[in-house]
Every structure is written in C-alpha cells, then in structure tokens.
Amino acid sequence: MSEAILEIKDLWVIYKTDLETVAAVNGIDLRIGKGKTMGLVGETGAGKTTTALSILRLLPSNTGRILKGSIRFQGEDIMGMNEARIHAIRGDKIAMVFQDPMTSLNPVMTVGEQIAEAILLHNEGIKTAEVDRRVDDMLGMVGIQASRKGEYPHQFSGGMKQRVVIAMALACEPELLIADEPTTALDVTIQAQVLTMIKDLRDRLGTSMLMITHNLGIVAKICDDVAVMYAGEIVESGTVEDLFLGKRHHPYTDGLFGSIPSLTSRATRLTPIPGLMPDPSNLPKGCAFEERCAHRMEICLKQHPQKATEGTHSILCHLYGEKP
Amino acid sequence: MSAIDTRTPLIEIIDLKKHFKLNGGAKLHAVDGINLKIYPKETVGVVGESGCGKSTLGRSVIRLIEPTSGQILYNGRNIMKLGGGKMRELRKELQIIFQDPYSSLDPRKSVIEVIAEYMFIHRRYKTRAETYHRAVTLMDLVGLARRYANSYPHELDGGRRQRVGIARALSLNPKFIVCDEPVSALDVSIQAQILNLLMDLEEELGLTYMFITHDMSVVKHISNKIMVMYLGQCVEMATSDELFANPQHPYTRALLSAIPVADLSTRDKDFVILRGEVSNPINVKPGCRFAKRCDYCTEACTLADPGPVEVSPDHFVSCFLMKQEV
C-alpha cells in the first residue's frame, strides 16, 4: 500500500436548516494513495459532492456542518487549519473541477485572466512574463491554442470550457485533483477527448485524483480504487478489480450494475433497484438500503451493518458481516 | 428482413427538412433530408450528439414544429397538409414524452390534473368523474401510487415526474409516441425502472416509439432499428444488432468507441478520438458534413453529398468509403 495523500476518517456532515436536518455524510472512511485515482460512485444525493466540499472546506457556512471525523491531507489536519493555511492549500495543493463548465467560469473575465488568477494568487512576486508563459503552457497542455487566451468563456464550446476549467485547476500543479462529474455535461465524443486528456495529464504530472462520477464506465477506464456511496455511507470499497471482478458485492452495487443496459449482450429486461433512496432527513435506524434490498433479513431493520473487510475489499452489509 | 417491408409503415418520413431562419438571412439546416420508415410496434432509435437535429426531427414528425419541406405519411396518409381541426383530431394518436420532467409539467397543476388535461381538451369523456377515473387507472398503469394524485410536480422526484409525463402521453390512447430523451435526466437505477416501464407499455398497448437519445447503450437496449444522425442528416441506419456488430460509418465507429464501458477488459483500450467538435449546420456547403473530423476524408467528400448506400439488407450508410467498395 502506497503512502496516503488524503485520509478521511469517520466523517459526519449535516446540513441544518430551521426546518430539518439532513444527514448528508454518515461516517465515511476514505483513503487516497499517492499518485492513485479514487473513483467515488453514487447517485444524486448520495453525498459525493458534500464529501468533496468538506475536503476543501467549502461547505455552505450557514447550513453545512462537520459533526465529527478527521480529514488529513499529507498528514496535516485540514479541519484544524486556520483560514490563511486553507487558502494557501486550496487551488494550489488541492484543486477542484466542477461539473458544469458553463457556471464555473467568470463570464466577464477572459480565460487567460482566469488561469493567471490562480497562478498569481499562489506565487507571490512572480513576473508577468512568467505568468504569461505558464498560461500559454497550460492552454497548450489542454489542447487550446494560446492565441485564444484573450477570449471570453461564451466564445468557447462546452468541451473547450471544461478544458479551460481543467487548465485552471492544474495551473499550480496540485498534488490532489478533485474532479466532480467533469464530463457529465459533455457529449460522448467530447467526453472521450476530455477523459483521455485527464488520464494523460495525470500520468505525466503524477497527480492524485478523486474522481466523482455516477458512470461505472468512467471508473473502469481511469480509476485505481473505487468507493460506492449510498445515502451518505460508503457501502463498498476496494480496487477496481475488487469491484468489477470480485465475487461478493453489496446488493446496491449489484443493483447499479444491473441497471446499466449492456452494449455487448442483448438482455430483454434490466434489473433495476426498486424504490428510491431514503429521505436523508429521516434515515432508517438499521441499514439505509434495507427498503430496496432483495436480500433483506430481520437484522437489517434493527441494526446498522458493520464493515466486512477482506484484503482491500470492504462491504458494509449484514450478508457478509459477523452474525451476532 | 424483406418480410417486414410488405407491411405498411405506421409513419413514413420522406425527405423531411427543417431549416430555421437566422438573423441576417442565414439558414440553419437542423433537419436536412431525412427518410425513415417506422413500422407498427417497432421502436426506432435516433441517436446523435447535442445539436445534431434529433429533437427537431422528433418534433417535426408530429408537427409540433412545422417542417420546411418533405412529407410525413401516417398510415399512408400525408399529414403535412392537414388543417388545424383534422390535425388536432390526429394528435390523439401522435404523442410525445419530453426529456425534462422538471419543466414539461405545469407546476400549478396537481398530478391528476396534469394527466386529465388532454382528456378534457379533447372532450374524451362526458363527465369529470369519468375523466378522473381514467386518470387514476393511468396512474396504476405507469406504476404511480394513487396517493400522489393530489401532489404537485415539485413534490415528486424525477422518476415519478417522468411517470406523470408518460401517463399524460398515454391518456388519449396514442398509436405512436416520440420519446425525446425520456431517461437522460434520471439516475441510473431510476433510468432502468423507466426503460422497463416503456418496454412493458409497448408490449401491452401495442405502441410504436421513436426513441431519441444520446446514450448508445440505452438506444441499443430499447430499439429494433437505429438511425445515427450527424448535423441534420442520417449517416447510418440499421437494425440494432447489425449496427453494434458491424458499424460502418466512421462517425458511428467513433461514437461507439467513445463510450466508457463498465468492464475492465477494455480498460487499456484507447478511445478513438474524434478531432474537433460538432459545428453548426448554418448555410451548409455541399459535401459530407463529417468530412472535417473524419480520418478517411478524401477530395470527393468535400465536393458532393454522399447518398445512402445499402451495404447489406436494411443497412444504409452515407459515406463515400462504401461507394468505393460497392
């Protein structure tokens, strides 16, 4: 096992309003090895983005709250950092690419200025010529002609905008890149371009990555390790081999695979997971997946499951845990 | 294959065009000469990337958008010339399910009112009670619990909202339904539920679908026949099995290769990367529209439109490469 760049232990996050308390992340453990790409998989509302925002301390300050747990980046406790320290890390050591390139760029700044902003912020006293050179380099790296740096975001297509966002994120050569559904808003052929580019850059720069996605195909293509999230918990985690080739799985993971129409075989019916994710403001006492599970047992109603681990592969389910 | 051809198509589209006029006299060729036959109880998939004209095609077929030229035959009868009253009558049989269940439902109408609306418009039943009774049976049919009858769309999740949209489309006993990306806005597990529902309804009610999507695995799953569109034109058309087993057009091949498959055996295989992006079909010049991004582009490709070539029975490809082989 390689050295960890990021280690999350027993993280609990809630969103609290006057009306309700939403349990968004409920005690997750996540470890990203140096130079590795971790895929965080799950459906809408599973808590993937909340986890990412917690790492960068970007949770909405009026509602989001970390109840307990620790997040350590290169051994340093992120939650204990003062504002100045987290500012120094955010965008420099840890960078993030958001899902929607249309809304994550500033419409009244040229793309060149936006890339330069990150470089200027994290390199005090840097010469203008040097900044220009690095902006040109970054654009070249993501496959955009440097001559277009004076243009505004609206002059670029969706795929090009996402390249600009990735160029901004990589401008300071971060140690960890968090990519939150970076290709969901793009067409498949453009997605293939962007994924290939991300893969090449990662291999060249040795960046560690947290890849948030709902697409198991993307996981199979570029991730080393995977964690499957459901209702704020990591229900299964392991290497990609554990997840795609392993014999034992969490029933939710099985359900996700059963829901994808296959390109190679001709199945007449899909086997979806019945029902919906439980309301995160009112989670069941036992297993969160119990209501939709085909292997439901009596114990699932009463008791929260324990993690069953075998080598690198962990499953949070009573089927595999020690029976009391 | 030839056995199919003896039947009358339910829908036949002949050289359908839709050109939008832009400022300054330019024309956007959204749909440019599409020919398609859809037989009863068949599902025809239309795939392509954003901006290829697939939604415009779907809406033109049922005249929600008035086509510029061409013919649409419904049961052999040209519906392009029908007047308002007759067309309204026919709308009962031609329905559409929209992509976004969040914006295609009236936020001020409850579920039961949304489902009953078309039946009131077409005066389907004499009394309100009969209409609402039918609306409730439609809710049962699409798997929507009756307790949601008085809920408003914002209270439902995406999957249930899409079920409302489906119930509404079914309310007038249509024969033909255009499904315009009906599962694209949904999570995978919910997407699978809705796909199964649509396939069950097809079976039970003998429906015919035109299924528009950008998702190749979804289209393969649900369609008998698939048409691949690029910038307003059909580049390849074949049965679902044939298209995936034996794709011929360079664009289709690239599209299929670009899908990340949830299978480790293809992990180290590189995507076929297409250069550039889809451009706009504004004031198009003659020549293959895909030529700029195509690795096999020759001089011939930039001079004239490649017409469709039947490479094997019912498998049509519009590419000059095929002409050389034939």
Image (cartoon, rainbow, N blue to C red):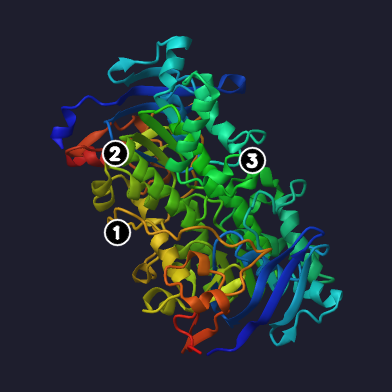
Q: Position of residue B55 (x, y in %)?
A: 47, 34
Seen at 43% across and 26% down, the residue is B172
Q: Relative to residue B283, is residue B102 depicted above or below?
A: below
Q: Which mark is nearer the camera, 2 or 3?
A: 3
Seen at 38% across and 71% down, the residue is B264
Q: Position of residue B294 (x, y in %)?
A: 38, 46
The amino acid sitting under disc 3 is: Tyr
Chain under callout 1: A
Quarter of the image for residue B2 reads top left
> Is disc 2 placed on a helix, strand or loop?
strand
User: Dot 2, how many residues are within 10 Å of its Cα: few (below 14), some (14-19), or many (20+)?
Assistant: many
Q: Nearer the viewer, residue A323 or B316?
A: A323
Which residue in the protein does label 2 denote? B237
Tell me how far mark 1 sits from mark 2, CA to CA: 19 Å
Which residue in the protein does label 3 denote? B152
Q: Position of residue A137 (x, y in %)?
A: 64, 63
Q: Nearer the viewer, residue B310 or A317?
A: A317
Q: Which mark is nearer the camera, 1 or 2?
A: 1
The amino acid sitting under disc 1 is: Thr
For the residues bearing labels 1 and 2, Cβ distance under 8 angstroms? no
Chain under callout 2: B
